[in-house]
Image (cartoon, coloured by chain):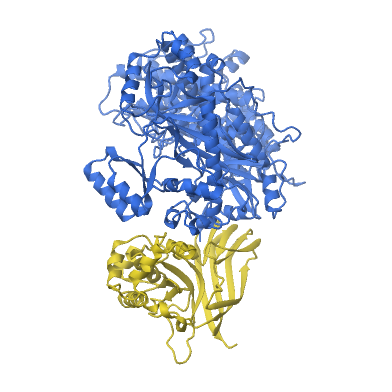
């Protein structure tokens, strides 16, 4: 078990005062089989009129707040304490299930969970159907190959074929551009992985979270550690969701902290808002994710 | 009964019988009026008898009357993508008639279907048991664009989700009604049904007496009552709301996407009819978790929103981010139970024809009942067997996307070429979840009046339901739409279909139900400004300004055109000959002098025109040749934003934006103005070159001017009618005050421009007289002047009348006084010692004007070419008026800030 203290600070500076804003934050780490969020504290400045927490469709915690006073700057600081288990050790017998079998089971089984899982095979707003993705994915999904081996190979290929380039894309860059120029950031690579899996009829979802900022002395620092991170997950029947981080070419163990999941980035946008005011804004985000001794 | 009927049915021609008989032989559609053995169905007999007595020729003239009524009432629809023009609504005077017993069965089926759909909706946004238990395939819901995950658990279970519901029906060859489609987000058409009924009741009054028809008003009354009860019901079913709500007088608004929406007429109509406030997304704001209307006197809480904005546009925070039509924070306000939206966002998930094949099973599962009304046979391509069927029968089926979005449409197999069929096949195979195949229903035909004859035309019926406490109420009637050509396969408004009234026969005559009788003991006491949004107030203000501006332009144009015309004919141009020969005030002049001076005079008038229309450089530095083209441009050119036509367009569009505020009469006048505006626009030469490439013969020019003068005269009458209706028929609440402030400001500004351009420059005395006379005429004060002074034109006296005469409703002082009265009563927080900005401004204007002395203003020294005192005063007053307009806009109108996405 590893313990982390994460401080995620988002700051908007406005050129002209904003009188009113409505915001939704998905910044509270989830609690599930391999992770327990012990505490998550929001500090919003200026002070919001009201905030409210609710669970969204995917079970993520949404923190809703509005600010009803003129402000030039909005700061949202979330401090969370999370315990993470090393989940890789838990992968068991499902590991050798061929990918075609998984796909076939998905349509043959009619239990409630499978029926719900099938929504993750469908296109989603940021991962539309792109024919090239099918062709790209096929190389990893050879006949009879175990699902997890194939996905691991896909993740590795994404890591090798694509360049991590924070300046190249924004959240608005379409996936086809990423594919064409072979550059992007964690979020793009996660979307690519999801698109490939769905093109083959396999369920995949998007995970947003953090990775450890300062590595233990014997390990390499991870890419994308200075901001929120993202990776993807594939569904393995009788087992559940298995995560892959194509940006770092690895399967998350205990150095990945999960915040939220959904079909793609649009479902789990960490902080979004509508502001009433004129002029432009500047954004700065910092994440500090440190291991704590417990 | 009709077996022994010996009536000579002269209104039913042989061709009608022949058509029905042909259809009958093919075993295809049946007719609503004629049975298969060519007898008139009993429920049609009273109507047909009345029609037989009336005769088709008379019916045709009633038809014209109906079209005229609809046109005059401004019943229109907008064809998507057409920026300009609202198409007139087409109504066939022959209704679709449905018998009492038939309708009872249909109603029962509709009510059952509404209840079922409500259960499905509640489940899909709640537990999703229907998916988890395998009754609805997950892909059918999850790949449908109407399933909005943000709306999960939005509405507490137990509270009706589907409040308002519309359904399209058609009668199949078996005589049963079939459901063609379900409309669950913001169903359109109810107002058109109502307007059709109103028009027909006026055109065919005795028919209603003879036939006995269910009234529609009962439905709207129960809708009003249900809405009234909703907040109470909501609170009792969901515990207490988080915020104190006035439940006794819920404030209800109709949310429209705005005047460019295809059914904007209907939004305005229903708001007006039910007495609710018509608003756009910008008019609403969420504050303290509640929805508020930005009204002219501040924020007013909103309890219920009847929305005509589609689901995904309702909230830019949680739904479509680029939406400008919704309200940020709306979903959260709904979750807080602080507002009720009818229907709640998310309800569009039911607008999915793919659900139809699963409904019978779901009905049995959820309700333990069989569906009473069948849906048209539908195959969802997401299921392999159904997909195979669709692919094998592409040629005969109708292929529809499960989710309607701009650009998506239904395809009719029989109409497709082989290549198109192949493309479609490939699309279905690539994304089977997104398509259904539907049986093409041979809808029944019903008699329609086509060019003076009865012809059988296929028809479909849209009817409406609303959730009441005890279940759903069905509108006893609806909107029937007919194909416009016999060959066409579609029946739709968008493609130019014709509508019909729908008569449900009543077993006994129904009493008239007034919408007024309902709120016994709970009468609303509305404040004067209740529900006037800032946007509506601003539009009214601009209606006032544009109407006044158009009037001023038209009057001046008329004077100048008159003058040009006289010139052309080589006649004496002076005013005097035509009006009152006795009061000759100009000296007789030598021929040469006259010509030069005429030119000076004309220049000055044209300068006024340029100033008025803000179409600089206008006539400046132009030779006389271009004079006429410039005149025409100022009048007709839509590219010239100061032209008369542009002003009229702006007037019509501002008026349209507050469509719900006008009386029928006012709207008729507005329609005439719009017509005239269109005619004027059309009179512009095709090549758009107003000046004309060559020089046209003087004769054609002359004719053109005659036409222009005639339309200007007409326009003046319409504008006067408008101003009269505004003055006499509008309640003098804040809305009227906004409009009248617009008028006063504009009239003042026009007068100032006129005086500055014509009277400030020092000129020969007799030219000044001519100018004074024209200014008096343009300011509609010449008659007053003549009657009052009966002497020669005296500059200071004329100036007195134009500027300072408190009794003349055209004088500047009069305008400022009225403006001051209006400003005084505007809603504001009272500061004990300090005047508000607009109060200070109007005080300054009044003081400056009243302290001035017309003799001093008129005076000038021999060396100067300008009356500097007059110029200074006028410039200052114009500036103050512009400032007032700006301050009003900032303080009262622009509570609107555009949202941005982070």
Q: Residue at horizontal 69%, vertical 33%?
A: B821
Taking B741 as reference, is B84 left or right? left
Total marks shown come to 0
Taking B97 as reference, is B239 left or right? right
Q: Give B901 or B743, whichever is nearer the viewer.
A: B901
Query: In which quadrant of the rendered view does residue B439 lie?
Result: top left
Query: In which quadrant of the rendered view does residue B81 lie?
Result: top left
Q: Give B471 or B567, whichever is nearer the viewer.
A: B471
For the question of whether residue B875 can be seen, the reply is no
Q: Which chain is yellow?
A: A
**Residue A264, percent across and down?**
44, 65
Q: Give B564 or A67, whichever is nearer the viewer.
A: A67
Q: Residue at horizontal 31%, vertical 67%?
A: A179
Q: Which quadrant would the C terminus of chain A be assigned to in this image? A: bottom right
Taking A125 as reference, is B809 left or right? right
For the view shown, which residue lies furthest in the left direction? B418
A47 to B249, vertically: above or below:
below
B440 to B384, vertically: above or below:
above
Q: Which quadrant would the N terminus of chain A be assigned to in this image? A: bottom right
B898 to B884, vertically: above or below:
below
Query: In which quadrant of the rendered view does residue B413 lie?
Result: top left
Q: Give B461 or B739, whichever is nearer the viewer.
A: B461
Q: Residue at horizontal 61%, vertical 19%?
A: B509
For the view shown, which residue lies furthest in the bottom direction? A218
Q: Which chain is blue?
A: B
């Amino acid at each position: 078990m590893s313990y982390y203290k994460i401080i995620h600070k988002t700051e908007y500076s406005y050129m002209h005062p904003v009188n009113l804003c409505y915001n939704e934050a998905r910044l509270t780490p989830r609690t599930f089989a391999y992770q327990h969020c012990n505490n998550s504290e929001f500090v919003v400045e200026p002070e919001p009129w009201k905030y409210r927490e609710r669970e969204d469709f995917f079970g993520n915690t949404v923190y809703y707040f509005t600010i009803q006073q003129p402000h030039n700057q909005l700061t949202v600081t979330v401090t969370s304490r999370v315990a993470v288990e090393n989940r890789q050790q838990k992968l068991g017998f499902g590991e050798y299930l061929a990918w075609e079998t998984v796909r076939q089971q998905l349509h043959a089984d009619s239990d409630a969970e499978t029926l719900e899982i099938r929504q993750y095979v469908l296109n989603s707003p940021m991962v539309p159907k792109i024919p090239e993705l099918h062709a790209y994915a096929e190389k990893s999904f050879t006949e009879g190959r175990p699902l997890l081996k194939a996905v691991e190979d896909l993740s590795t290929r994404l890591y090798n074929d694509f360049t991590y380039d924070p300046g190249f894309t924004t959240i608005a860059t379409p996936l086809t551009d990423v594919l064409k120029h072979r550059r992007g950031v964690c979020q793009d690579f996660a979307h690519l992985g999801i698109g490939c899996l769905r093109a083959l009829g396999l369920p995949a979802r998007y995970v947003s979270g953090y990775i450890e900022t300062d590595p233990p002395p014997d390990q390499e620092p991870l890419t994308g550690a200075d901001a929120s991170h993202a990776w993807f997950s594939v569904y393995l029947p009788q087992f559940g969701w298995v995560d892959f981080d194509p940006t770092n070419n690895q399967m998350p163990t205990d150095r990945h902290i999960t915040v939220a999941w959904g079909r793609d980035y649009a479902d789990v946008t960490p902080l979004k808002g509508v502001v009433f005011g004129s002029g432009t804004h500047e954004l700065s985000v910092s994440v500090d994710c440190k291991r704590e001794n417990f | 009964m009709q077996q022994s009927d010996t009536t000579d049915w002269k209104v039913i021609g042989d061709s009608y019988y022949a058509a029905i008989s042909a259809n009958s032989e093919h075993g295809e559609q049946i007719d609503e009026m004629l049975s298969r053995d060519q007898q008139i169905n009993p429920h049609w007999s009273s109507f047909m008898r009345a029609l037989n007595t009336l005769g088709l020729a008379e019916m045709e003239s009633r038809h014209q009357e109906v079209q005229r009524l609809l046109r005059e009432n401004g019943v229109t629809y907008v064809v998507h993508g057409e920026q300009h023009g609202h198409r007139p609504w087409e109504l066939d005077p022959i209704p679709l008639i449905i018998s009492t017993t038939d309708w009872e069965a249909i109603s029962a089926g509709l009510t059952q279907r509404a209840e079922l759909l409500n259960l499905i909706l509640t489940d899909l946004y709640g537990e999703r048991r229907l998916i988890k238990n395998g009754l609805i395939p997950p892909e059918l819901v999850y790949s449908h664009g109407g399933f909005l995950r943000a709306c999960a658990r939005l509405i507490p279970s137990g509270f009706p989700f589907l409040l308002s519901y519309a359904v399209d029906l058609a009668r199949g060859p078996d005589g049963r009604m079939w459901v063609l489609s379900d409309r669950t987000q913001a169903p359109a058409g109810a107002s058109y049904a109502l307007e059709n009924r109103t028009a027909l009741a006026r055109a065919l009054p005795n028919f209603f007496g003879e036939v006995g028809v269910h009234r529609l008003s009962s439905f709207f009354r129960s809708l009003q009552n249900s809405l009234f009860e909703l907040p109470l019901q909501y609170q009792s079913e969901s515990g207490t709301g988080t915020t104190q709500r006035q439940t006794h007088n819920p404030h209800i608004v109709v949310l429209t996407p705005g005047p460019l929406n295809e059914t904007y007429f209907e939004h305005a109509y229903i708001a007006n009819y039910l007495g609710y406030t018509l608003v756009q997304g910008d008019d609403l704001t969420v504050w303290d978790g509640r929805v508020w209307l930005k009204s002219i006197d501040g924020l007013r809480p909103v309890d219920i929103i009847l929305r005509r904005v589609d689901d995904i546009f309702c909230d830019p925070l949680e739904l479509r981010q680029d939406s400008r039509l919704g309200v940020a924070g709306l979903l959260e306000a709904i979750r807080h139970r602080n507002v009720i939206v009818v229907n709640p966002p998310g309800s569009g998930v039911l607008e999915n024809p793919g659900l139809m094949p699963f409904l019978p099973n779901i009905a049995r599962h959820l309700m333990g009942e069989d569906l009473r009304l069948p849906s048209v046979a539908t195959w969802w391509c997401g299921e392999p067997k159904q997909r195979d069927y669709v692919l094998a029968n592409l040629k005969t089926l109708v292929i529809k996307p499960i989710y309607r979005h701009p650009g998506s449409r239904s395809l009719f197999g029989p109409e497709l070429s082989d290549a198109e069929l192949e493309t479609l096949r490939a699309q279905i195979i690539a994304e089977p979840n997104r398509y259904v195949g539907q049986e093409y229903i041979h809808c029944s035909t019903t008699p329609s009046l086509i060019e003076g004859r009865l012809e059988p035309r296929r028809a479909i019926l849209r009817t409406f339901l609303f959730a009441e406490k005890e279940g759903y109420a069905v509108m006893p009637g609806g909107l029937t739409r007919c194909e416009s050509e016999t060959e066409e396969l579609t029946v739709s408004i968008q493609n130019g279909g014709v509508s019909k009234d729908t008569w449900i026969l009543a077993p006994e005559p129904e009493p008239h139900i007034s919408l007024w009788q309902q709120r016994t003991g709970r009468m609303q006491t509305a404040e004067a400004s209740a529900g006037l949004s800032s946007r509506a107030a601003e539009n009214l203000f601009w209606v006032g300004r544009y109407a006044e501006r158009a009037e001023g332009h038209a009057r001046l144009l008329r004077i100048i055109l008159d003058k040009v015309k006289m010139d052309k004919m080589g006649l004496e141009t002076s005013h005097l000959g035509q009006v009152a020969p006795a009061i000759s005030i100009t000296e007789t002049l030598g021929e040469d002098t006259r010509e030069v001076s005429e030119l000076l005079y004309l220049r000055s008038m044209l300068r006024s025109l340029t100033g008025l229309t803000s179409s600089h450089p206008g006539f400046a530095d132009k030779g006389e040749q271009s004079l006429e083209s410039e005149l025409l441009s100022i009048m007709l050119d839509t590219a010239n934003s100061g032209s008369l036509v542009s002003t009229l367009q702006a007037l019509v569009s501002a008026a349209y934006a507050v469509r719900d505020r006008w009386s029928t009469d006012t709207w008729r006048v507005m329609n005439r103005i719009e017509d005239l505006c269109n005619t004027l626009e059309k009179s512009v030469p095709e090549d758009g070159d107003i000046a004309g490439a060559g020089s046209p013969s003087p004769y054609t020019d002359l004719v053109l001017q005659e036409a222009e003068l005639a339309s200007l005269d007409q326009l003046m009458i319409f504008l006067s009618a408008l101003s009269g209706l505004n003055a006499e028929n509008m309640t003098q609440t804040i809305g009227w005050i906004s409009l009248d402030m617009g008028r006063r400001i504009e009239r003042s500004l026009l007068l100032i421009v006129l005086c500055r351009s014509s009277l400030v420059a020092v000129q020969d005395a007799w030219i000044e007289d001519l100018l004074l006379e024209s200014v008096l005429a343009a300011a509609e004060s010449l008659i007053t002047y003549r009657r009052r002074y009966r002497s020669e034109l005296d500059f200071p006296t004329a100036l007195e009348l134009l500027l300072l005469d408190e009794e003349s409703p055209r004088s500047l002082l009069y305008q400022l006084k009225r403006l001051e009265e209006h400003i005084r009563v505007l809603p504001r927080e009272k500061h004990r010692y300090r005047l508000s900005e607009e109060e200070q401004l109007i005080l300054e204007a009044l003081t400056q004007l009243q302290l001035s002395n017309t003799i001093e203003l008129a005076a000038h020294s021999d060396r100067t070419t300008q009356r500097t005192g007059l110029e200074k005063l006028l410039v200052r007053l114009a500036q103050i008026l512009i400032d007032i307009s700006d301050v009003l806009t900032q303080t009262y109108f622009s509570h609107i800030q555009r949202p941005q996405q982070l």
